[in-house]
Image (spheres, rainbow, N blue to C red):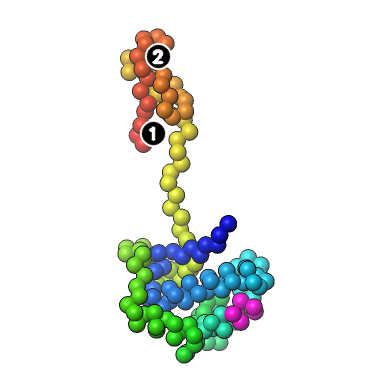
Amino acid sequence: MTDEIAMNPTYFGVVNTNETMETLVHEMVHMWQSHFGKSGRRKYHNKEWGDKMEQLGLMPSSTGKPGGKRTGDRVHHYPIENSAFVRACKNLLSKNFRITWADRFPAVSKEEAEGLEGVMIEIQPPPKATRTKYTCPTCTTNVWGKPALNLVCGDCGKTYRAEDPRN
C-alpha cells in the first residue's frame, strides 16, 4: 500500500502557485498526522494538526484569516510572514517552478473552487459491457450474451452480428 494526496487540477487553474503549494502542505500535514500523530475524527482538524501547520509556516484558521478558530471540521490556513513555508515557496518560485498540469479551462470561479482544494474529481471510464446484443442479419432474431461470442443462427446458418454498444 502507498499513500496518495489527490488534488483537483480545477483548483490549480483558478488560484496562484503559492495557494496551491499551501494546499499541498495542508494535505501533507494530514498525511503526516495519520502516520505519526493522532488524527481527529473524519474531516476534523485537531490541535496536533494545527501545531504542525504552524510549525511549518501556515497558520490554521477557520476563516483563512487572522482571528479564526484553529480547530474544527472546516479549517483553512494563511501563510505566516517570513516562515519556513514562505521562504521555501519564494525559493521554489525564484527557480521558475510552475505547475503545468492545471485545468486550463476550469468551469468554476476562484470562490467556487474554495471547496475543491484537496478534492479529487475522478473521471472513470464507462463500465465495460457485460452483455452484448447479437442480431442475425437475415432473420433479424436477437440474442444476448457476453462480448466476443461467435454465434451462428440455427434457422438460417448466418453468423450473428454484435451490435455496437455505443448505439
**Element under disc 1:** loop
Residue at the top extreme?
Answer: 155
**Where is residue 76 shown, x and y percent of the image?**
52, 76
Question: Is residue 50 on the magenta stretch?
Answer: yes
Give the extent of the magenta segment.
Answer: 47-52
**Where is residue 131 shown, x and y percent of the image?**
46, 30
Question: Is residue 29 on the magenta stretch?
Answer: no
In this rendering, position of residue 159 left or right of residue 86: left
Identify the image quadrant of the C terminus.
top left
Q: Main secondary structure of the magenta part?
A: helix
Q: Which residue is mark 1?
A: 165
In this rendering, position of residue 113 left or right of residue 68: left
Name the residue nearer the viewer: 86 or 132.
86
Q: Residue at x 43, y 24 (%)?
A: 149
Which of pointers 2 and 1 lies earlier in the amino acid sequence?
2
**Where is residue 55 shown, x and y percent of the image?**
57, 84
Compute the Cα span from label 2 to label 1.
21 Å
Q: Residue at x 59, y 80 (%)?
A: 52
Q: Callout 1: 10 Å neighbours few (<14), some, many (20+)?
A: few
Q: Residue at x 39, y 83 (%)?
A: 91
Query: Three-letter amino acid code at disc 2?
Result: Cys
Q: Is residue 135 above or below residue 118?
A: above
Residue 143 disc label: none
**Element under disc 2:** loop
Q: Which residue is mark 2?
A: 153
Q: Quadrant of residue 42?
A: bottom right
Q: Is residue 95 above or below residue 149?
A: below
